[in-house]
Amino acid sequence: MYPNFKDYFYFNQVEKKGVILLLVILLLLIGVNVWMSNQSQVITHNSSKIQEGLAYLDSIAEASKDNNRNYEEVEPKNQILNLTEFDPNEFSVSEFQKLGLSKKQASIIENYRNKGGVFKSKSDFKKMYSISDELYQKLEPYILLPDTFIYANTKRWEKKDYSKNRKTWKPAEVYLNTSDSATFTKLRGIGPTYASRIIKYRTRLGGFRSINQLTEVYGITDSLVQTFGEQLKLDTIPIVKLNVNELTAKELKVNPYIDWSIANSIVAYREQHGKYKKLEDIKKSVLINDSLYNKLKYYLDIR
């Protein structure tokens, strides 16, 4: 008996899988061959893009050596930023540091450029692995590049000269005696808690006479005050003075330089000897020395 014609096209389960795999491989080879023939000119044209891609991968590897993307460890703290318009293709490491980048972050950008990387748009700069989203948001308005870059056929990218009409960023001025708590938070290192403490201390004091008096506010150090620079201004206002001839000990104690014992001694002397004829007489209390008097004399009167 002759074999059934269909028997020639019968495959068992293993043979079926082998045929399917073979067909897939053939289709892939055909597709790759077509794609390669169509893309040969594109690959040649975009050799610079490949170089930039390799440079970008190198920058990622360098930024992630410690396998930790914790920007708080590399971005400087409590630094006054000198924000100015810049082209990331031209800035040096030291110039990047003035913008708030750490030396490590700036070096990664420099290495990226040295290996053929070019920033053609703001989005290219944002892709840098060493730049956090928070830092990018601060720098974005000052980047002298278009938001996105559009390739024009075979024309090479040309840098534009943005050096003209550069604007230097100037921080908002904060006035020590009249600013509200929201304005104080514009100072680097001052959050809502510190701002509230400053306002309360200023009210108790009757007004600041010196910027150095800020260090008397709990938690504010001299080194922090130094970082404010010229952003913090001492504005002159009439000091609110306390009348030592009329107020009670409790009312005098509002001033942060006066505690209960000092307040009671001022009132006790007044009750024993009558009203003060001159403010300097409060030094007759053994609790008030010259150093303390030199602080108090600006905040007390005998009217």
Image (cartoon, rainbow, N blue to C red):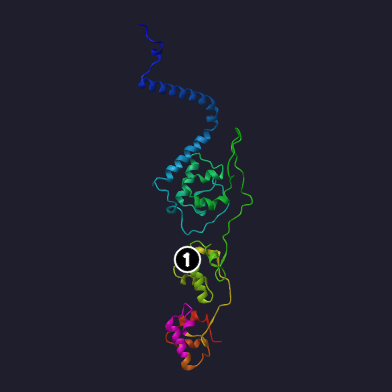
Rendered location of residue 81, percent (x, y): 52, 57
Whether residue 190 appears in this view of the structure is no
Image quarter in which the C terminus is found:
bottom right
For image coordinates 36% across by 22% down, the residue present is: 13
Q: Is residue 124 above or below residue 268?
A: above
> Along the horizontal axis of the image, is 267 left or right of 144?
left
Instruction: Specify the amino acid type for callout 1.
Output: Thr
- Characterize the local packing of mark 1: few (<14), some (14-19) or many (20 or more) Cα atoms within 10 angstroms: few
For image coordinates 40% across by 48% down, the residue present is: 68
- Furthest residue toward front: 1
For image coordinates 58% across by 56% down, the residue present is: 169
Residue 268 drawn in magenta: yes
What is the magenta range? 249-269
Rendered location of residue 252, percent (x, y): 49, 82
- Furthest residue toward right: 165
Rendered location of residue 14, percent (x, y): 35, 22
Residue 70 drawn in magenta: no
- Furthest residue toward top: 1
What kind of element bears circle 1?
helix
For image coordinates 40% across by 13% down, the residue present is: 6
Whether residue 280 appears in this view of the structure is yes
Q: How many marks?
A: 1
Rendered location of residue 205, percent (x, y): 51, 76
Q: Is residue 92 above or below residue 287?
A: above
Q: Badge 1 is on which residue?
A: 193
Q: Main secondary structure of the magenta part?
A: helix
Image quarter in which the N terminus is found:
top left
- Judging depth in this view, the residue of 134 and 156 nearest the camera is 134
> Along the horizontal axis of the image, is 249 left or right of 235?
left
